[in-house]
Image: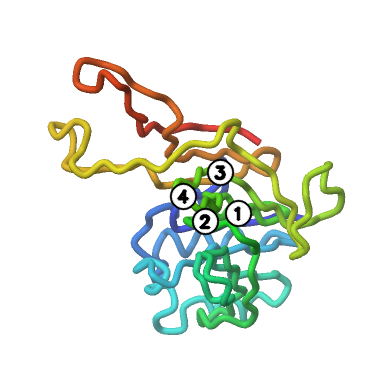
């Protein structure tokens, strides 16, 4: 089965739609739309669109019918529109990851929680191949308020879970980070010549069908210098291939 992945934040390397990353929108007669039309002529094709309701590019795609015409004109193609976010809507008082299946008009047809429990999960990053892969930060519960962070990835079940924990929601969970790290307060910034304030709290996740490539902000390393003789946690960017 051929799988076409479309993402507003990232798309797998080598994808036929790599040129769509950060594209302004899908407009009639645009080169981007022509690529989609050509791609969906392939037999046994599934299109997985990672859709973000807050994204102006995604919103533009739904104007004047958006994807509806493409879906209608290509009944042999399986289209999947999915969106991911974190909120506390389960009533637990904790932030958890939520996954929605959407129709071609951007309306949610099925919404479910991917995570649960007494920890908090934030900032999910979604990729897809024959399965869905959701990377996110998990903040451990700590009565003192000094919870530690880790990066985890939840993979939709397609068979064997390779020994990883099953969270009971149709996903297996795998730890990405090899070491937990603290959050860092950096207002004012450690180096105001670089930026007034920052924290490498963004996260990215792409898949090429064989591996996932995940990047995230990580504060495990400690820097000691004349400005910080007692040491301070350094906001860095880490990378892992799963």
Q: Which residue is mark 1?
A: 134
Residue positioned 70% across, 77% down in the render: 75
Q: CA distance from mark 3 to mark 1?
A: 10 Å
Q: For marks 1 and 4, give the CA distance.
A: 29 Å
Question: Residue 51: where, in percent of width, then height?
Answer: 50, 67
Q: How is the image coloured?
A: rainbow
**Residue that mark 2 sits on:** 124
Tell which circle, 4 or 3, labels the residue nearer the N-terminal end: 4
Q: Quadrant of residue 189?
A: top left
Q: Residue at x 62, y 62 (%)?
A: 48
Residue extending farthest to the top is 226
Would residue 48 appear left or right of 9 to someone viewing this image? right
Q: Nearer the viewer, mark 3 or mark 1?
A: 3
Mark with earlier residue (3, 1): 1
Which residue, given by chain and number where applicable, does mark 3 sit on?
151
Q: Is residue 196 above or below residue 222?
A: below
Q: SS class of the residue under badge 1?
A: strand
Q: Earlier in the sequence, mark 1 or mark 2?
A: 2
Local packing at callout 1 (Cα closer than 10 Å; few below 14, some 14-19, many 20+) is many
CB atoms at circles 1 and 2 under 8 Å apart? Answer: yes
């Amino acid at each position: 089965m051929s799988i076409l992945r479309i993402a507003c934040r990232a798309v797998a390397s080598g994808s036929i739609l790599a040129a769509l990353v950060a594209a302004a929108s899908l407009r009639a007669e645009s080169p981007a739309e022509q690529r989609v039309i050509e791609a969906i002529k392939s037999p046994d094709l599934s299109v997985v669109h990672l859709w973000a309701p807050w994204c102006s590019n995604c919103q533009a795609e739904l104007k004047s019918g958006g994807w509806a015409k493409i879906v209608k004109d290509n009944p042999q193609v399986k289209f999947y529109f999915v969106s991911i976010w974190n909120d506390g809507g389960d009533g637990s008082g904790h932030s958890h990851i939520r996954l929605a299946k959407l129709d071609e008009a951007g309306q949610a047809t099925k919404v479910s929680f991917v995570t649960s429990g007494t920890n908090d999960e934030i900032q999910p990053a979604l990729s897809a191949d024959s399965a869905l892969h959701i990377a996110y930060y998990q903040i451990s519960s700590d009565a003192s308020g000094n919870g530690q962070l880790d990066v985890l990835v939840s993979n939709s079940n397609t068979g064997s879970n390779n020994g990883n924990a099953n969270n009971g929601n149709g996903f297996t969970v795998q730890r990405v980070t090899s070491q937990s790290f603290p959050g860092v307060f950096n207002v004012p910034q450690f180096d105001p010549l670089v930026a007034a304030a920052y924290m490498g709290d963004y996260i990215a996740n792409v898949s090429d069908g064989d591996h996932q490539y995940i990047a995230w902000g990580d504060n495990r390393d400690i820097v000691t210098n004349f400005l910080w003789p007692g040491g301070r946690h350094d906001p860095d960017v880490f990378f892992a291939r799963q």
